[in-house]
Image: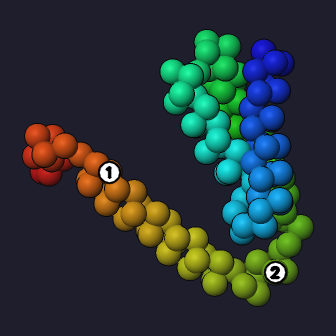
């Protein structure tokens, strides 16, 4: 299990290094995730151990939101002054993400299944 967790961390580290060396304005962990996706694609999917580690991480994902909740309390004054702008940005970005995801999903659907997607 620790070896598989090390594999995940290795891909994150490689993504960080690539982004730092190239200077592209892209999140390093996201780059590492894309590299991991490519690795798993060419390997034929994740191993059973890697699946178990991924499931365990997802099951405990709620723990990662504790720092975010603490930051909200710590930056209460900023939230009070700019809360409306932050909320508007969150709503707009969520709506944009849903629309883009829907368009991508609809464009990737086969013509035979396109009728199944429409009501």
Residue 62 sits above or below residue 79 on the image: above
Tag 1 secondary structure = helix
Report the front residue among 112 and 64. 112
Please report the residue visible at 32 percent of the width from the left and 51 percent of the height from the top.
105
Q: Position of residue 9 (x, y in %)?
A: 80, 35
Residue pointed to by mark 1: 105
Neighbour tally class for label 1: few under 14, some 14-19, many 20 plus, Cα within 10 Å? few
Residue linked to disc 2: 78
Of circles 2 and 1, the one toward us is 1
Q: Residue at x 13, y 46 (%)?
A: 111
**Quick one: 85 or 93, which is closer to the camera?**
93
Query: Neighbour class for label 2 at 10 Å: few (<14), some, many (≥20)?
Result: few
Q: Quick one: SS at disc 2?
A: helix
Q: Position of residue 56 (x, y in %)?
A: 69, 24
Q: Give the left or right position of residue 36, taking residue 21 as reference.
A: left
Image height of 119 relative to 72, above or below = above
Q: Position of residue 18 (x, y in %)?
A: 77, 53
Q: Is residue 80 above or below residue 8?
A: below
Colour scheme of the rendered structure: rainbow
Instruction: Tell me, yes or no, whether the two marked residues, 2 and 1, touch with CB atoms within 8 Å.
Output: no
Question: Which dot marks residue 38?
Answer: none
> In this view of the protein, can residue 75 be seen by the observer?
yes
Q: CA distance from mark 2 to mark 1?
A: 37 Å
Q: In the figure, residue 82 lies in which quadrant?
A: bottom right
């Amino acid at each position: 299990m620790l070896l598989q967790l090390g594999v995940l961390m290795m891909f994150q580290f490689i993504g960080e290094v690539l982004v730092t060396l190239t200077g592209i304005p892209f999140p390093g962990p996201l780059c590492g995730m894309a590299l991991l996706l490519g690795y798993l694609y060419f390997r034929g999917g994740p191993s059973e151990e890697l699946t178990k580690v991924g499931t365990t991480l997802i099951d405990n994902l709620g723990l990662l939101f504790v720092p975010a909740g603490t930051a909200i309390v710590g930056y209460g004054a900023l939230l009070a002054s700019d809360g409306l702008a932050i909320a508007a940005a969150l709503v707009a970005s969520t709506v944009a993400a849903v629309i883009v995801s829907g368009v991508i999903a609809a464009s990737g659907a086969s013509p035979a299944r396109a009728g199944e997607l429409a009501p």
